[in-house]
Image (cartoon, helix red, strand yellow):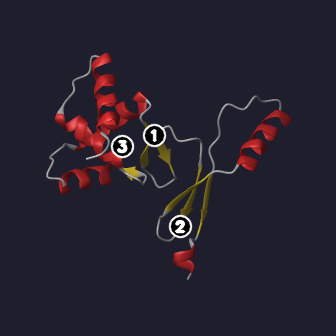
Amino acid sequence: MGDPRVTDAFATYLRSHNLPVTEQRLAVADVVLSADEHLSAEEVETRLAGRGVSVGTATVYRTLDVLVKSGLVVERDFGEGFRRFESARGMPHHEHLICTVCGQVAEFRDERLERMTTLVAEAHGYVRQRHRLVIYGVCAKCRG
């Protein structure tokens, strides 16, 4: 089990939006919120099954959408044809590197990049609100 305070926060969100607080929803939340990696809906289902928890596919998808709306989970699209999810955990904005061989996802932060995106936006007459960068390549493990 993950941090009960986080699943409690999700239960509070559900109640405040008049949504049912069910064991299945809390189990999905626990899997995603306690994961260190970016999980697909299928991987969430697999982990739930590994815990002996039966949750329907539709419930997994609906719960993931609610978790994103709650702000506890962030949705990522790495161009794989499906979405991935990661705990927001109050993490600062970060970017992703994805290995095109093994699919490993690495996160990184670079203040120079943050400054550069602001400068590029301003040079084109924009006020930057947010950005997303995904770098695709081959990781050291797959190269060596």
Callout 3 crowding tier (Cα within 10 Å): few <14, some 14–19, many ≥20: many
Disc 2 residue type (three-letter):
Thr
Q: What residue sits 82% from the left and 39% below the top? A: 119
- Say what secondary structure mark 1 lies in: loop
Residue 89: assigned label: 1
Disc 3 residue type (three-letter):
Leu
Tags 2 and 1 touching, CB below 8 Å: no
Tags 1 and 3 touching, CB below 8 Å: yes
Q: What residue sits 25% from the left and 47% below the top? A: 1
On screen, residue 69 versus residue 142, left or right, reads: left
Callout 1 crowding tier (Cα within 10 Å): few <14, some 14–19, many ≥20: few
Residue designated by label 3: 33
Quadrant of image for the C terminus = bottom right
Which of the two discs, 1 and 3, labels the residue nearer the N terminus? 3
Residue designated by label 2: 100
Residue extending furthest right?
Answer: 123
Which of the two discs, 2 and 1, labels the residue nearer the N terminus? 1
Residue 139 percent location from the top left of the image: 56, 71
Residue 54 percent location from the top left of the image: 15, 46
Q: Nearer the viewer, residue 123 or 82?
A: 123
Q: Rounded to the nearest whole Å, what is the CA distance between mark 1 and mark 3?
A: 8 Å
- Say what secondary structure mark 2 lies in: loop
Q: What residue sits 57% from the left and 75% below the top? A: 140
On screen, residue 92 versus residue 42, left or right, reads: right
